[in-house]
Amino acid sequence: MLIEVHIIQNHAPSNLNRDDSGSPKSAMFGGYRRARISSQCLKRCYRTSQTFRDEVDALGMHTRSMPAEVKQRLLAHAETITDPGLKAKFIEWAEKSQVKLTAILGKGGGGAAKAEDEEKEEGAAETAESGEQASEDGDFEGGEESEATTKKDKYQTAQSIFWREAELQALFDAYKERIEWDKDVPDAMRKAFDDKGKVKVKEMVKVFDSSPNGLLGTQISSIKSRRDSSHTEIDQKNPTKDGETDKAKKDREKKVKDGKARADEQAARALAQLLVERMDPKAILRGAGLRPEGIPVDMGLFGRMIASPLMLNVEASSQFAHAISTHEWQREFDLWTRVDDRRDKRLDFYKSAFGAEEKLETGTDGMGDAEFTSACYYSYFNVNFEALVDNLTGKALKHDLDDSADRNAAKQRACDAVAGLIKAAIFERPTGKFNSMATPSLPTLVLVEVRDSHVAVSYADAFAQPVDPKGEEKLDDQGRSIRTDLPKESAKRLLGEANRITKAFSRNASARYVFTGGQDLGTTLENGKVPAEVVEDIDILLAKVRESVCPGSNG
């Protein structure tokens, strides 16, 4: 099922979406320069709007600062802890662990691939440095201070990533559990790493002389038992023999020493692995990031594309076109000046209010110009409803997933998302220069089409020849010259193009709804099989869309 939305909306002088020079964005279309609002700008405007948030249940977080978000959650949890030692450890880990996480997620673009090749002992080094043997310079990764710790953006990843709450919560829970568990780690285990995170075998085997509690103690005892068994087996395979020569004795003792050293090294690495397995950020993130469930509605709509192998890509179920003006673009300039209040002629006011005794000479403190335009835009987007439902259940990410149990709930979430997106497109607009130009407006026309076909079609060709009010003057009944109403003419053009395509390509829809805000456009929308319905109220429009998409939905 495909839901297509076409909107005609007129804006007074504004600069809603600027390019790198501060000019209103533009594009060539039909051989004419048009005002433009980028699709990315529109998607962000709708996704982050209160209108959209009020209609949906859960949203993702698009940010470079995910490590900082996890850090703040750890710090907030630290404030609830009464044990001073544990509280201090939470604060310490909130700082150090997120620098490490930033590096794993790809600092400068190459960290994700590099992280996959890092030796596993680094995870053990985290425990060593979180205790008494933390390196003197405070570096989390070793003796040399990492690049991430020297920059102001040390809690920012190289790319802005769309995060799920499940991923954020998994990382927080893992760090929380790891910090609480750390108090059971023996001091000997903390000291058994060099400044590069490599295991010191002789120091690590001293852990066997300690008696830690809980699960860690059980695991250490198991490793010690295997190591002791290996020592015994080596002794049994190399017994003392009567009449043994000095050379034979020396060779036997060397073989026993080397064998036991290898057993000790294996045991030391197994002990270090306990720490790695207990808190490997890559494994934690992979566990949450590669699970298909828990996709928020905005991620299901707009998708997620990332280079990290630790998280799933999500294919967008919606398509957004750049909004373009239905007419030729005209750039204009606003000359602005800034004036010191004390230069104002009403000097008496400033004397009484501020004690000003001297009036400055007339003139300005600064001046410049700002570009703007006024345009009537055609915007278009569509949503593949089944693809959205597949995203929300996780079936799109794991094709063999049986999503039958979750599909009805996902359909309701998807229905809310579609209705919220349409409502946001009607009531929200980009905020560029909004405070200085204040151009709140509502659409002249909203056309919503629901069809079974997966083939999407824009009606932008209706404006390949620009709507030109200056060149389309008419005479009224009394012979007076009148000019074309730009938004109404644009709306009529759009409906005419819809009728042409419907007839020429037999492109019928199961439902078509036209909202004109109570205006008479002087034309109608035709439909081959199902009559188009003119809707006079926006709430009725959204209710009808819901019913067409999810029959029986109560909204």
Image (cartoon, rainbow, N blue to C red):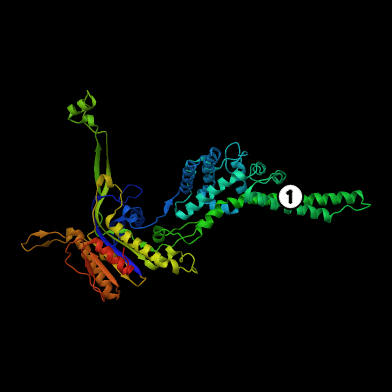
Closer to us: 152 or 121:
121
Query: In x, y percent, where is residue 429?
Result: 29, 53
Within-10-Å neighbours for mark 1: few <14, some 14–19, many 20+: many
> Going by the picture, which residue comes out furthest to the top?
357
Q: Which residue is mark 1?
A: 264
Query: In x, y percent, where is residue 55?
Result: 33, 57
Closer to us: 148 or 392:
392
Query: In x, y percent, where is residue 131?
Result: 60, 40
Closer to us: 449 or 434:
449
For the N terminus, give its image quadrant. bottom left
Relative placement, left or right, of 150 versus 474 is right
Query: In x, y percent, where is residue 288?
Result: 51, 57
Q: Is residue 232 visible?
A: yes
Q: Quadrant of residue 136?
A: top right
Q: What amino acid is at disc 1?
A: Asp
Q: Quadrant of residue 139?
A: top right
- Taking 512 as reference, is 261 above or below it? above
> Going by the picture, which residue comes out furthest to the right?
243
Q: Secondary structure at mark 1?
A: helix
Q: Is residue 320 visible?
A: no
Closer to us: 91 or 21:
91
For the C terminus, give its image quadrant. bottom left
Q: Which residue appears at 49% of the width and 68% of the height? A: 401
Q: Which residue appears at 29% of the width and 76% of the height? A: 506
